[in-house]
Amino acid sequence: MTDTPTDSPWARLTEASVGYDGKAVLAGLTLALRRGEFTAVVGENGSGKTTLLKTLAGILPVVAGRVELTGTGGTLPVIGYVPQRDSLDAVWPLSAYEVALMGTYGRLAIGRTFTDAERRLTRECLAQTGAADLERKPFSVLSGGQKQRVLIARALATVPEVLLLDEPTAGIDPEATRAVMELLSRLHHERPLTILMVNHDLPLARRHATEVLRVADGQVRFESVGDLEGRR
Amino acid sequence: MNVFTEVLSPTFLLRDALYTSVVIGLACPVIGVFLVLRRMVFMGVALPQLSSTGVALALSLHALGHIHVEHGGLDEHSLAFVGALTFSILAVTALAFFEQRHVAWNEARVGAAYVLSAAASLLLLAKCPTAERGWLNLFKGEIIAISNSDLKLTVGTLAAVVFVLWIFRKEIILVSYDRELALTLRKRVFGWNLLLYLLIGLAISVAVIAVGPLVTFGFLLLPPMAVRPFAGTMRQFVVAASVLGGVVSVAGFVLAYQWDLPVGPTDVALLGIVCGVGHGVQWLRSRALSSR
């Protein structure tokens, strides 16, 4: 196994088209996403931000071209994925702890149950995101901000190299938004963790991200964080 | 109380029927939990119907002389089981395929499959009175006609289905609850969905042969619906639904025996009452909470 240089890209897209059911939403994308960055993907609703994120996460297959993902060990990177919280059905009777524990499933062999180490790690992740006191509560009754903390804890329980978040602050109050973004900034600096976050809140992206990827008119391009100031 | 002790006595004449009823009462809700949580309740109606169409086809072909049952080979009941299982497996495989392809109108397709299979059953049996009698008994849920071989088949199959569900619960819950997370963790979502559907198909085929589509659907759906408002975790949900199904199957049998009613519809009616009481309690609880 060869070690990958820490400044090499974790994702490289070459003439890639991303979309649903074989139909491209964004076409001809060529870009490299560097390790260690906190990237905000911004753009209008329906511009293709989430489609790009889901393709990078391996949820959607690439329609055309190439998407190469490289982890630090030269293998595929471990991805911690935080979906839009409303995508999870509230009918499921799962506690916050059970939801967070799902992050460890990727490391467990088929049919094997959790070890004490996995349970301990999950509790540590919940504590790290400030959700330790929520672990026994049903996930479906938590507030938007609380759910986001649990979902970030679940993503951390995968022991990720890259954290991908889909609109983590959509529909939550300003106080919870601030807390979630501060948590992400802290994780980015302390771990350190590569983060790619879809968000349409430009001021928020400017404040926390180290680089910005703008999706507009079927095109994707990097902007410096400072460029956003002029657009406000 | 005399009837209750008589029914529970090991020498009770209809003990095979009682045991089968209890096994179905315990196992079907465990499978039904996944139908309810994955919002595939309509599939829970359609699959028993499709299974019974498989039974109708097998019985008709047999009665019309297209399938010959030889001594020591398949008996009529085994033939019905093969028919039910074939139709169930074809249906669940098609469902998994459509889901994988994100084919729209999946619910409408299930509805169409239900109504077409019901019509096909009636047409198949219209010209075949012998097969029709057997099929109607099955459809009505005549549990008392169950033989010892039916009991063994039901216990063995349902125990295997519940065991496999238990072993792979982690994977099945993951792909059912959050398909996207499962994909990012590089799980084989199609394979796990197919396994779940095959287990559902197998369980429904066996249950339909033993107690008919009405009782099967009743035990699949009503216990999970009754206990869902009170369950805080998956384990509580599955255990409570299964225990409720088991208890109602015994109580239903006792009541049917005492009042000379058909067992299947009595079980379903009792489940309906429990479900109504559960939702009433939940409604009162939410009113009390909102008035605080």
Image (cartoon, rainbow, N blue to C red):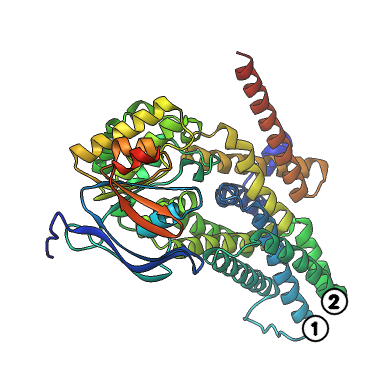
Residue B63: image x %, image y %? 79, 80
- Write down the residue under mark 2: B128
- Write down the residue under mark 1: B64
- Please tell me whether residue B257 is drawn above or below residue B168 in the rendered image: above
- A186 on left or right of B132: left
- Please tell me whether residue B204 is drawn above or below residue A101 in the rendered image: below
Q: Which chain carries label 2?
A: B
Q: Is residue A146 visible?
A: yes
Query: What type is the residue that disc 2 sits on?
Result: Cys
Q: Quadrant of the C terminus of chain B?
A: top right
Query: What type is the residue that disc 1 sits on?
Result: Leu
Answer with mark 1 or mark 2, whichever residue precedes in sequence: 1
Mark 1–mark 2 Cα distance, whole angstroms, equals 8 Å
Residue sitting at x 52%, y 65%:
B100
Residue sitting at x 49%, y 61%:
B193
Closest to the observer, B4 or A12 = A12
Q: Can residue B14 be seen in this view?
A: no
Dividing the picture into quadrants, the one containing residue A99 is top left
Q: Are marks 1 and 2 in contact (CB under 8 Å)?
A: yes
- How many numbered circles does the render carry? 2
- B193 on left or right of A79: right
Residue A176: image x %, image y %? 40, 28
